[in-house]
Image (cartoon, helix red, strand yellow):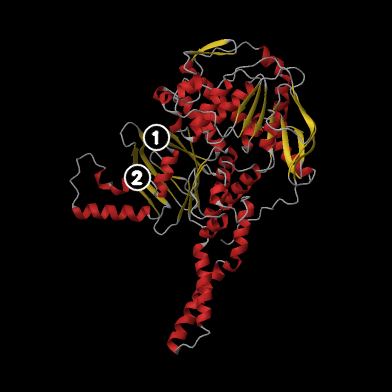
């Protein structure tokens, strides 16, 4: 894929770019210095090479991207070719060049050296991290996605009207021929059902009402509309930059299935590891601008990456350990996973009493323990909450035990953020009560990141300018602490206002967890983070001697860390379930749990 590899969906899995070069320069592979090729020979080789690459959905040769000031090379000599139908997941740390690669492929960024061209006449669709919607309303944007199809229907209507007015024989013959051709195109695409296709796409992605004004939509709602529009455009190649951000778990599962069944080609940057596991046949890892391809899905990538680290004799033993742990978890059966979740609750006292580890040489996230928790952590007693005629919580009761990690799941707008606000006292129940134990010290990681000061440097924002920090019972150098969250060297002096979404997330996480809380409230903590940082966060939470309440759509994340699930099942019904998300889903299906009757069923977007 990259670094001289070419992927395609054929019996032969990998074809090296060097093979193409060998075919171009076959005559030069002698012990004697070859004669300089003539102009005709050069042209012949170029034509032959061009004919070969026309079979690929996309071809990149020698792609190099450098910052305008020349301070950093983002992409280094990338070589990438793949055949139609490939499903490629792109992973790498924040700043490794993932978004830059997609921008080049989409034609948005033209400031690079090398070649980047799609297959002739192929249609390329691009979803950026921050989608821009041109229409004023939701429906205006959805209509833009089906403009070509709607133009065919409009032309058919126009031609049909022409048939009702007097025309010469020649004119009538021309109109009838065009009318027949237009109808054949409409029939082939089943475009008579266009309105139903549009509604199906809006329902599947849980888009806001059709007449909603774009200017009032949240970032997540804009992303939903942008994805629906993109899918309706029916491209040959989809370039997706974090498509699952802000989507609830059910919408993510629907999108995963849609893209798995999609007949076209997909290149997706995503931190959703179930998507990488279930939908991708190749993983492209970008590291400091260079690319490393892996054949297979996410678990195959973990295994091969571990082997590569062993072969290169890497010194970071902690990273290899987390890869082994995650690979073991991926391969374990549901019963073994359930045993591990229960074991965490049993280990609470052990975690609390374990001396703080030596921090100076570690390179992973560490959440220092807070005060010992009492018997009461967070309890809800017969809580009811609603807005206008909408019931968010009905007779909700639960008790979170010490050491638990509770995942909160449900559709967007179900009331998950309201739950966090009631725990912190920012909102009150209509009836019933929330009890927060006297020993509880809360820390909140929200998805808005409003607490960050854009005028400060990363170092000052995280450390307050102090040379050292007290984490639990240990003192650690402040710059070393910042490096655990991916801010090394000059990155620590960056202004917060210029950080990317993933960098802002890491900055806030580093700032919040150093406070020594014993209960963490986390609202979509994995948004915009790279896979390595998410994995490090999981390991930190699993070792954390405290409790966490995590609102997340990341199913893999919820499966790995959760001991309990708080699930919004519709009509104000919320279930407190012992187990992780996968176990909750199995329970849900096995027991035919009732769901909100107003929830739209997810039908496939067929014949678009």
Task: Tell me where residue 74 appears, x and y as whole percent.
Answer: 37, 35
* Disc 1 packing (10 Å; few <14; some 14–19; many ≥20): many
Of residues 603 and 118, the one nearer the viewer is 603
Disc on res. 232: none
For the N terminus, give its image quadrant.
top left
Relative to 521, residue 198 above or below = below
SS for callout 1: loop
Q: Which one is earlier in the sequence, the residue at label 1 or at label 2?
A: 2
SS for callout 2: strand
Relative to 376, residue 122 above or below = below
Q: Is residue 86 in view from this perspective?
A: no
Which residue sits at x=47%, y=81%?
175
Q: Are marks 1 and 2 in contact (CB under 8 Å)?
A: no
Count of all numbered marks drawn on residues in the image: 2
Drawn side of residue 384 relative to residue 236, left or right: right
Q: Which residue is mark 2?
A: 61
The CA span between labels 1 and 2 is 14 Å
Task: Tell me where residue 255 appears, x and y as whole percent.
Answer: 59, 48
Which residue sits at x=50%, y=63%?
147
In which quadrant of the rendered view does residue 470 lie? top right
Drawn side of residue 319 relative to residue 56, left or right: right
Task: Tell me where residue 287 appears, x and y as whole percent.
Answer: 43, 32
For the C terminus, give its image quadrant.
bottom right
Q: Which residue is mark 1?
A: 289
Q: Nearer the viewer, mark 1 or mark 2?
A: 1
* Disc 2 packing (10 Å; few <14; some 14–19; many ≥20): some
Task: Tell me where residue 331 appears, x and y as whole percent.
Answer: 63, 33
Q: Is residue 276 in view from this perspective?
A: yes
In which quadrant of the rendered view does residue 425 lie? top right
Which residue sits at x=45%, y=51%?
83
């Amino acid at each position: 894929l990259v670094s001289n590899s070419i992927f395609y969906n054929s019996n032969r899995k990998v074809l090296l770019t060097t093979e193409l070069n060998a075919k171009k320069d076959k005559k030069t592979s002698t012990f004697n210095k070859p004669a300089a090729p003539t102009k005709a020979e050069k042209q012949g080789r170029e034509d032959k090479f061009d004919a070969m690459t026309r079979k690929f959905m996309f071809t990149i040769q020698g792609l190099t991207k450098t910052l305008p000031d020349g301070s950093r090379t983002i992409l280094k000599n990338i070589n990438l070719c793949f055949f139609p139908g490939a499903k490629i997941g792109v992973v790498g740390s924040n700043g490794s060049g993932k978004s830059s690669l997609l921008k080049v492929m989409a034609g948005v960024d033209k400031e690079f050296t090398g070649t980047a061209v799609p297959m002739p006449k192929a249609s390329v669709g691009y979803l950026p991290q921050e989608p821009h919607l041109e229409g004023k309303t939701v429906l205006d944007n959805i209509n833009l996605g089906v403009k070509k199809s709607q133009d065919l229907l409009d032309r058919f209507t126009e031609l049909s009207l022409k048939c009702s007015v007097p025309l010469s024989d020649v004119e009538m013959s021309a109109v009838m021929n065009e009318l027949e051709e237009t109808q054949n195109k409409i029939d082939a695409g089943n475009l008579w059902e266009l309105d139903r296709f549009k509604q199906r796409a809006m329902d599947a992605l849980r888009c806001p009402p059709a007449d909603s004004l774009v200017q009032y939509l949240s970032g997540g709602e804009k992303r939903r509309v942008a994805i629906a529009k993109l899918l309706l455009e029916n491209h040959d190649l989809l370039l997706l930059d974090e498509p699952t951000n802000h989507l609830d778990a059910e919408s993510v599962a629907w999108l995963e299935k849609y893209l798995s069944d999609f007949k076209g080609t997909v290149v997706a940057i995503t931190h959703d590891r179930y998507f990488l596991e279930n939908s991708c046949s190749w993983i492209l890892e970008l590291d400091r601008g260079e690319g490393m391809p892996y054949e297979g899905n996410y678990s195959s990538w973990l295994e091969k990456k571990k082997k590569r680290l062993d072969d290169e004799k890497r010194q970071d033993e902690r990273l290899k350990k987390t890869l082994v742990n995650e690979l073991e978890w991926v391969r374990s059966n549901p019963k073994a996973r359930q045993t591990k979740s229960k074991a965490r609750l049993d280990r609470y006292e052990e975690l609390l009493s374990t001396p703080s580890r030596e921090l100076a040489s570690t390179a992973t996230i560490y959440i220092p323990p807070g005060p010992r928790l009492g018997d009461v952590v967070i309890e809800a007693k017969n809580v009811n909450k609603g807005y206008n005629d909408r019931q968010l919580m009905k007779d909700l009761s639960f008790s979170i035990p010490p050491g638990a990690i509770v995942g909160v799941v449900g559709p967007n707008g179900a009331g998950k953020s309201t739950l966090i606000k009631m725990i912190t006292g920012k909102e009150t129940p209509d009836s019933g009560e929330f009890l927060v134990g006297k020993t509880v010290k809360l820390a909140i990681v929200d998805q808005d990141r409003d607490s960050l000061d854009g005028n400060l440097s990363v170092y000052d924002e995280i450390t307050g300018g102090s040379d050292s920090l007290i984490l639990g019972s240990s003192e650690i150098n402040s710059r070393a602490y910042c490096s655990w969250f991916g801010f090394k060297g000059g990155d620590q002096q960056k202004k917060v206002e210029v950080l990317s979404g993933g960098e802002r997330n890491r900055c806030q996480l580093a700032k919040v967890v150093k406070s020594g809380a014993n209960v963490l409230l986390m609202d979509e903590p994995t948004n915009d983070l790279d896979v390595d940082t998410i994995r490090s966060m999981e390991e930190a939470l699993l070792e954390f001697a405290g409790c966490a309440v995590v609102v997340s759509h990341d199913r893999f994340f919820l499966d790995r860390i959760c001991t309990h699930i708080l699930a919004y099942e519709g009509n104000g019904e919320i279930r407190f379930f012992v187990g992780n998300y996968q176990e909750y889903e199995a329970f849900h299906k096995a027991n035919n749990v009732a769901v909100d009757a107003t929830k739209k069923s997810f039908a496939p977007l067929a014949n678009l």
